[in-house]
Amino acid sequence: MKTVLPTFEIIEPSFGSSFYFRKYVERANIKADVWHYHPEIELVYVNGGSGKRQIGSHISYYTEGDLILIGSNLPHCGFTDADTANTNETVIQMKPDFLGEAFFEIPETKNINTLFNLAKVGIAFSGETKKSIGIKIEAMEKQSHFDRLISLIGILSELEQSAEYLVLNAEGFSMELQVQDNERINLVFNYVQDHFRELITLEEVSGLVSMTIPSFCRYFKKITNKTFTKFVNDYRLVHASKLLAEKPISISEICFESGFNNLSYFNKSFKEFSGRSASQYRQELRSVFVIDVVDSI
């Protein structure tokens, strides 16, 4: 049985800088599939393409690129893999106090502290914000260390003022737990990641963390604001969304490849989850991709 805990990632600032900056070209981020966490706040811009997000207990599928802000010690996986059509991915990681403990308390920058607090549950930005900030993030690659710092402060200030965002985990969600709790919840997350295509019973997963079924159900709901059954179901449905976008296989095959053993139940669940049938979802994605290709010619 695989019992891998999330990797604690040690991050060193880029040479000559107070924070880490790296642009990965053509899916070169080899850590993309690793479930990990770190004390640094992480800002990620994925230029185009699609992929799966898993941040805390939130699981979703993005299209047309992504702009994500992830708070300190919030476990997450990367956002690109070999099947996604992303041009590149830019990652910025900074400690909450990377400019000194008092810097974000002064009147001019206090709003950024508000943003960092909201980022504890994960934030996804969209619309014009994603587009305009993405351009600014990629432009940082060719800037001097000083200009890059000024750009980052400006970007964080703009993000705090944007109304085009989605909070990814429920209010009150936090993965800043006791060591024992961190080990338990992340053991469960890893188990689901490895076994979601199979039948997962409450007996086996509660036994995995040495708890009774009632205790485990209360514990999981308290930490994630989701029942364990819903968490697993959401994971399977997001995987189905990914397959619908990326694999030319039948909906029946996608159903079983995603861990469902009943096609009618899958169809009902997918429509409740996405607001459209699996075939409609696939058709809409194809329309978006065709428009993107035409626009790029």
Image: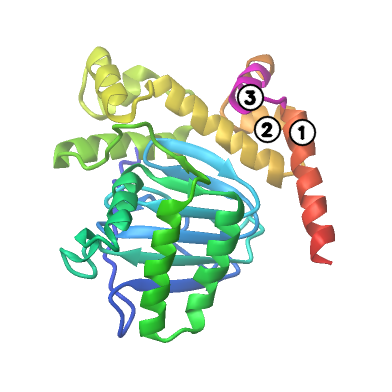
The reply to whether the C-beta atoms of the residues labelled 2 and 3 are less than 8 Å apart is no
Image coordinates of residue 223 in percent, x first then y, are: 27, 29
Taking depth in this image into account, of 116 and 77 the one nearest to the observer is 116
Q: Is residue 184 left or right of residue 155?
A: left
SS of the residue under disc 2: helix
Name the residue: 50% across, 69% down.
137
Regarding residue 219, the answer to whether it shows in the image is: yes
When asked about the image quadrant of residue 193, the answer is: top left
Spatial CA distance of label 3 from label 1 is: 15 Å
Taking depth in this image into account, of 292 and 226 the one nearest to the observer is 292
Q: Is residue 256 left or right of residue 67?
A: right
- Give the residue pinned by disc 3: 270
Amino acid type shown at disc 3:
Phe
- Give the residue pinned by disc 2: 254
Image coordinates of residue 171 in percent, x first then y, are: 34, 32
Amino acid type shown at disc 1:
Ser
SS of the residue under disc 3: helix
Image coordinates of residue 278 in percent, x first then y, are: 72, 29
- Residue 275 colored in magenta in the image: yes
- Give the residue pinned by disc 1: 250
Spatial CA distance of label 2 from label 3 is: 11 Å
Name the residue: 26% across, 20% down.
216
Split into 4 quadrants, where in the image is the N terminus? top left
SS of the residue under disc 1: loop
- Residue 244 colored in magenta in the image: no
Region of the chain picked out in magenta, as a range:
267-277
